Amino acid sequence: MKTDIYQQVTDAIIANIEAGQLDKGINWAKETATGMPINYKTKASYNGINVLLLWNAAREAGFSNNQWLTFKQAAELGGSVKKGEKGQLCVFFKMLDIKDKISDEKKAVPMASPFWLFNLDQIEGIETGIEVALRSDFQQIESAEHILKASQAIIREEGQRAFYHTATDEIYLPERTRFSDVKEFYSVALHELTHWTGAKTRLDRDFAGRFGSEAYAFEELIAELGSAFLNAELGFTATMIPNHAQYINNWLTVLKNDKRAIFTAASQAGKAHSFIMNLVAVAEAKQKAA
């Protein structure tokens, strides 16, 4: 029987969510292996669904490293996978030309294919070190502030709720002194900033047609993942927004009804992350040119 990669990955994510404490939220990353997962050989960051899969694998196994290699890459670098270690399933997409049954015309569609990665903790014979994607020119909190300012989003610290107001295109946050932890403030701010990227003038996200009444919860999942990706960019684990157990239950409904939903959520969160970091790069370029 041919393996359904979409279902296999979705089942793994669902199990991860259901294993968490719904009243406390889910930590996608592990503090000891913080940062976006990267390939040790190419230094390229993984993206989309693979970020979630690798974070989950690192959390479950207690890996201290955010760097990964294929079995072949480890051998090419003079290392070897330790006996008994198992690789983490990941997914890449390649375009496949298929013939439309109605028009008889060929069209390119993405096809998911599996590959396996091993954490550096699972490999011997290679000098390893924890390489965390930290910004060297800023302290952690300063770099978070840098991202918010570079976005040029209108952010108002007033009231008692955090939300993105679509009608006025403004982000509202409680005053930062109301938060029990400084990282929580920035995690919430980056969550709302991810919502901000979904406006029509930016990434134009609208999943009402696909998810119906669950579209709001699905957008919350995108924002949660977007915040986690941005937190990884800053070098600390996202602090989950409290009191959102209902959102998590709604996520489970969406994921169980649509095996491609988590792929879409991770992809959209990745696009939001790239959009925001591109704004940071533009702001930095302008500052250097001034």
Image: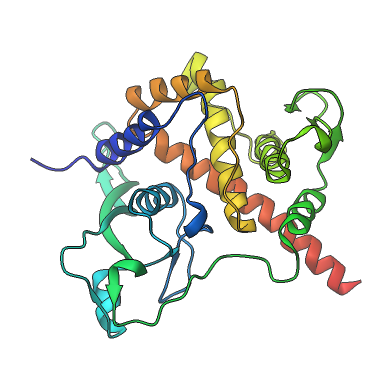
Question: As drawn, is 218 to the left or to the right of 114?
Answer: right
Single out the residue that lies furthest toward the left: 1
| Residue at image coords 82%, 51% | 149
Q: Position of residue 50 (x, y in %)?
A: 40, 52
Rendered-image quadrant of the N terminus: top left
Q: Residue at x 43, y 75 (%)?
A: 42
Write down the quadrant of residue 35 in the picture: bottom right
Q: Position of residue 96 (x, y in %)?
A: 28, 51
User: Is residue 36 shown above or below 5?
Assistant: below
In this view, the residue in front, 43 or 279, is 43
Q: Is residue 103 left or right of residue 284?
A: left
Q: Is residue 162 above or below residue 28?
A: above
Q: Is residue 231 visible?
A: yes
**Quadrant the C terminus occupies:** bottom right
Seen in the picture, residue 287 relative to 73 is either above or below; the reply is above
For this orientation, the residue located farthest to the bottom is 78
Q: Residue furthest top?
A: 213
**x then y, percent, for residue 104:** 25, 39
Q: Is residue 131 above or below residue 175?
A: below
The residue furthest front is 180
Q: In the depicted view, which residue is nearer to us: 31 or 152?
A: 31
Q: Position of residue 277 (x, y in %)?
A: 67, 56
* Residue at image point 36% right, 28% down: 18
What's the residue at 87%, 28% (across, down)?
158
One can see residue 170 in this view: no
Q: Foreground residue, 127 or 100? A: 127
